[in-house]
Every structure is written in structure tokens, then in C-alpha cells.
Amino acid sequence: MNAAPTDPYHEENYPTLPSLKMGICYICDKPLTGKVDGDHIIPDHFFRKTDECRPQLPVHHDCNNAKSRDDKFAVLELQTLCSLNPEAEAGLVSFLKLAEAEKPYAHLIGQRHKVRNLRLALTMFEHIQEGLDLPVQGKDIKSFRNAPKTADRINAYVGQLCKGLYVRNVADASPGLPTKMTWINYEHAKLHGSYEKALGPIINIVNTGTASRFTQQWPGRVLYFGSRVAENRDKGYIFIEFYESLGILARFGDA
């Protein structure tokens, strides 16, 4: 097995990578043998260049490559869901400009490598279902709903990401994938008058396990916190927030 990646943490309240004694790949749940990479659990696309202490775990090289293929898709989908936030919108607009610039190559044989962004944009937006116009900050904003296949894909991706964060912060944990996930888009919930109701289960669970709570924040981009909630290390939660606009609660072991 190759050496584990350098530990990016600097705070005392996080376990060091060597102390975790990682023998299992959190992505496939199989022993870490062969070529091993350091996986950035939260994709680098979310961070500014100056953002430090990004959580990592050792994973199989092939598992890391497979996850990396979904990273950009997941980031763009989450930026779309958070697009009322200026930083999320800027990231999405930058991508769409790249996709637009690739259109002249769309029908050229053997030039698929020149239209990667365009193909990804078509995959993302081809089956979006438009909804009602909603009044937001004095403007009418078109709402939309992802196709079930896309929603399932992004839900699975974020579930795996939350599992990685839990494993990274709770020593000796093997929680499996989340048993339940709750999503809340803050602006949409406020418009529909369901903000307080949606926050209820999140507030209830975060008030448990406070002694073992861990957290990291990169202001304006990503915040996460979590904890085990019982002596059983596999029972707990992760709450992650993107662009101060979208919160996701992942529960492990029926927490």
C-alpha cells in the first residue's frame, strides 16, 4: 500500500490521518490495497485558492478517479441550486460561457475532447422541468425541478460526501451511507412559508451529541458540522451548507 497523503488539518480538535488508522476505502468499503490516492472529500471546485485545511482521506486510485468524474457535475448542480448566491452564480456563469464557446466543435468528428463542458451542460439541463415564477428580491425568478434521475445522482453523491466527512472526523467509524437525508433550500423554503418547519428536524438533531461535535467552515462557500449521538460511533449526523443557501442533513445509523 502506498503512503497515506499528507494530513491537511492543523486544528487540535480533529484526529490526524495516522490516528485514524485507515485500512478501508470509504468510497467502496473495501481494504486499502494497491495504489492509494488522497481524496478531497469536498471537491476543490468549491474552494477559493486561499482556502486551507480541506478534508482528505486515503482511497483507492480507481475509486478516486470514479468520484472525480462526478465532482464537476455535482458542484455545478449545487451551484445551480444556490444560484441566487452571487458566488455560486459566478461559478455557474463561468462554466456556461465555456460551454457556449465549444459550440463550433459540436458536430466535428473525433473532437469530443473539445466539447466536454458543452456535453456536461446538455446533460445537466436537458431534462430540467420549469416551474412557477417566484418573486425574489424584487425580481421574478423562474423555478425549476431536476429530473428524478439527476436528483437521485446528486443525492447519492452528497450522501457519499457526508459519509466521508463523518469517517474523517469520527475515529473508527464505519457508518455506511446515510439512512436519511433532508435538503432545505433556504430561499425557496422562505418563499413557501416552510422555513421554520424545515429547520425543525435539523435543530432537534444538532442539539444532541454536543460534546463530540466537530465543525469546519470556509466563509461564504462551505460549512459543515456533525457529531456522533451515541456510544455507537456509527450513529450520528453531518450537516453541510453550500453558499449560505442550501443545507443538507445526513443521518447515520437512524440517528
Image: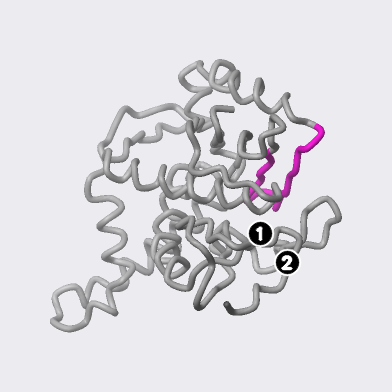
Q: Position of residue 109 (x, y in %)?
A: 13, 82
Q: Looking at the image, is 204 positioned above or below residue 133?
A: above
Q: Which residue is located at x 61 percent, y 41 percent?
A: 244
Q: Position of residue 237 (x, y in %)?
A: 62, 35
Query: Magenta region: which residues?
Result: 211-226
Outermost residue, bottom direction?
110
- 5 vs 78, left or right, is right
Image quarter of residue 69: bottom left
Image quarter of residue 241: top right
What residue type is disc 2 on?
A: Pro
Of the 4 image quadrants, the one containing the C terminus is: top right
Indicate whether residue 223 is drawn in magenta: yes
Instruction: Specify which label sits upstream in the sequence, 2 or 1.
Output: 2
Asked whether the viewer can see residue 25, the reply is yes
Q: Position of residue 179 (x, y in %)?
A: 48, 33
Q: Which residue is mark 1?
A: 55
- 226 vs 87, left or right, is right
Of residue 168 and residue 86, the one placed in the foreground of this image is 168
Q: Which residue is mark 2?
A: 8
Q: Main secondary structure of the magenta part?
A: strand
Q: Which residue is located at x 31 percent, y 45 percent?
A: 150
- Label 1 crowd (10 A; few <14 / some 14-19 / many >=20): many
- Label 2 crowd (10 A; few <14 / some 14-19 / many >=20): some
What residue type is disc 1 on?
A: Pro
Q: Which residue is located at x 27 percent, y 36 percent?
A: 130
Colour scheme: one colour
Indicate whether residue 228 is drawn in magenta: no
Q: Which residue is located at x 71 percent, y 67 percent?
A: 50
